Image (cartoon, rainbow, N blue to C red):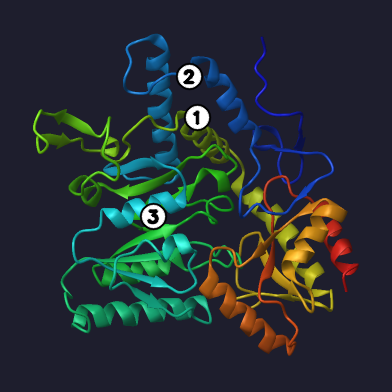
């Protein structure tokens, strides 16, 4: 019997070909990559190949279990290599970026001050302990560097109690509302100067550009497979081992221990990734994520970047040409960004527009505040001020592109939006 995993779907041929083709439904235009990217052919193939062998990981002596354990640990190595993990870093598989950042929040040494910006996704705003510092969204990337330098300087000078305690800077690599790139390298340099660590939410950056912990000189990296063309429920936290090995397990249970005695206190926890991966892991998610990482590692990333940037320019230019559409942005209009554009239609409810695009034009976009409520509300207010429009809605629309997106897709969006003017 042949096992069918996916309904019939053709690869969507856009900016790529081969293993990085993405699965899609003919006739449907998916412009919601920033929420969940379509599945890459290589990820689907990796899952299909392993399914007949699917068994327990780390817990069995049979051939199936041994093969799955090897596949799982190879996936860990592949993901670590792809993101430039150092030899003493841990690669811990999680459910997604939110899970990874919550894990990091749980292992912070006592008294750690976390410094973030107000433009973060909720996953990088909500997990941090009381006393965290949230800096305003700057007007440009250089402003972010200056603001962080000033804030860390104040912390170390004693403006906040516990100036000698650990400090963690947590910042996005690319904003999920606007796609704008944050100056991670410069922020890392500032963090180093002030003896702080830095964690990067790379959920939106990793699908569009190479991300290397060593090259960026950052301490932790959080990613989601479902943003990276591997929508099988796996993500990763990659980074320095010391805080991870010193903290209690994120989850208590089987696989996280090296010894459990009869007494309730007689427990020795494992070190390494196993310490925070209790229970049966998401083997297929890890393998799918690793398959995409390997395929991207072998691809011409410069060519993919150039193709995406050309399509992004077409998308932004087309939106700008519509008189009733206003784009959201935090930085200047020419600030570098990945394939994400958020906008509003004057006088139109965003949820109703999204429903109309789906029902009448087979176009999928996102509407709302994109799990970044403080930033999105600020940008909506600023857009009203720039445009002089008083009829902008309280929520926005977001179109996002990636592998498999085409000129036809964005042109169909323009044509549909034009009918709503």
Dot 3: few (<14), some (14–19), or many (≥20) neighbours within 10 Å? many
Cα–Cα gap, marks 1 and 3: 22 Å
Q: Quadrant of the N terminus?
A: top right
Residue drawn where x is 32% and y is 23% of the image: 58
**228, above or below 128, in the image:** above
> Which residue carries the number 1 mark?
284
Residue drawn where x is 42% and y is 66% of the image: 125
Q: Is residue 235 left or right of residue 353?
A: left
**351, above or below 345, in the image:** above
Residue drawn where x is 68% and y is 65% of the image: 341
**Could you say which quadrant of the image residue 43 lies in?**
top right
Cα–Cα gap, marks 3 and 2: 29 Å
**Tag 2's secondary structure?**
loop
**Tag 3's secondary structure?**
helix
Q: Is residue 305 left or right of residue 279?
A: right
Residue 334 locus on image (x, y percent): 65, 74
**97, above or below 132, in the image:** above
> Which residue carries the number 3 mark?
101
Residue 328 locus on image (x, y percent): 66, 74
| Residue 256's disc number | none
> Which residue carries the number 2 mark?
54
């Amino acid at each position: 019997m042949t096992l069918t995993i996916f309904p019939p779907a053709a690869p969507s041929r856009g900016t790529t070909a081969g293993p990085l083709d993405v699965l899609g439904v003919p006739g449907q235009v998916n412009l919601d990559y920033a929420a969940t990217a379509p599945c890459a052919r290589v990820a689907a193939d990796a899952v299909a190949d392993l399914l007949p062998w699917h068994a327990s990981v780390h817990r069995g002596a049979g051939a199936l279990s041994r093969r799955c354990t090897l596949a799982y640990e190879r996936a860990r190595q592949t993901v670590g290599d792809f993101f430039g993990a150092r030899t003493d870093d841990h690669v811990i598989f999680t459910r997604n970026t939110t899970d990874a950042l919550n894990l990091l929040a749980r292992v912070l040494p006592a008294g750690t001050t976390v410094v973030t910006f107000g433009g973060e996704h909720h996953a990088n705003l909500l997990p941090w302990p009381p006393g965290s510092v949230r800096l305003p969204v700057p007007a440009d990337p250089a402003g972010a560097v200056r603001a962080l330098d000033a804030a860390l300087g104040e912390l170390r000078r004693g403006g906040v109690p516990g100036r000698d305690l650990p400090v963690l800077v947590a910042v996005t690599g690319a904003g999920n509302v606007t796609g704008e790139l944050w100056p991670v390298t410069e922020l890392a340099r500032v963090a180093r100067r002030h003896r702080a660590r830095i964690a990067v939410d790379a959920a939106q950056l990793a699908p569009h550009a190479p991300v290397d912990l060593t090259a960026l000189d950052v301490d932790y990296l959080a990613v989601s497979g479902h943003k990276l063309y591997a929508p099988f429920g796996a993500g990763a936290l990659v980074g320095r081992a010391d805080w991870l090995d010193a903290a209690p397990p994120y989850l208590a249970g089987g696989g996280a221990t090296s010894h459990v005695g009869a007494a309730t206190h007689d427990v020795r926890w494992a070190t390494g990734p196993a310490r925070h991966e209790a229970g049966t892991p998401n083997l297929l998610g890890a393998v799918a994520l690793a398959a995409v990482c390997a395929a991207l590692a072998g691809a011409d990333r410069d060519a993919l970047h150039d193709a995406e940037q050309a399509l992004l320019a077409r998308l932004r230019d087309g939106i700008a040409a519509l008189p009733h559409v206003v784009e959201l942005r935090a930085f200047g209009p020419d600030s570098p960004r990945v394939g994400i554009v958020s906008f509003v239609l004057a006088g139109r409810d965003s949820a109703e527009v999204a429903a109309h695009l789906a029902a009448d034009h087979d176009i999928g976009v996102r509407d709302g505040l994109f799990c970044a409520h403080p930033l999105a509300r600020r940008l909506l207010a600023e857009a009203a001020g720039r445009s002089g429009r008083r009829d902008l809605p309280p929520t926005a629309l977001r179109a996002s592109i990636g592998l498999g997106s085409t000129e036809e897709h964005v042109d169909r969006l323009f044509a549909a939006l034009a009918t709503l003017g």
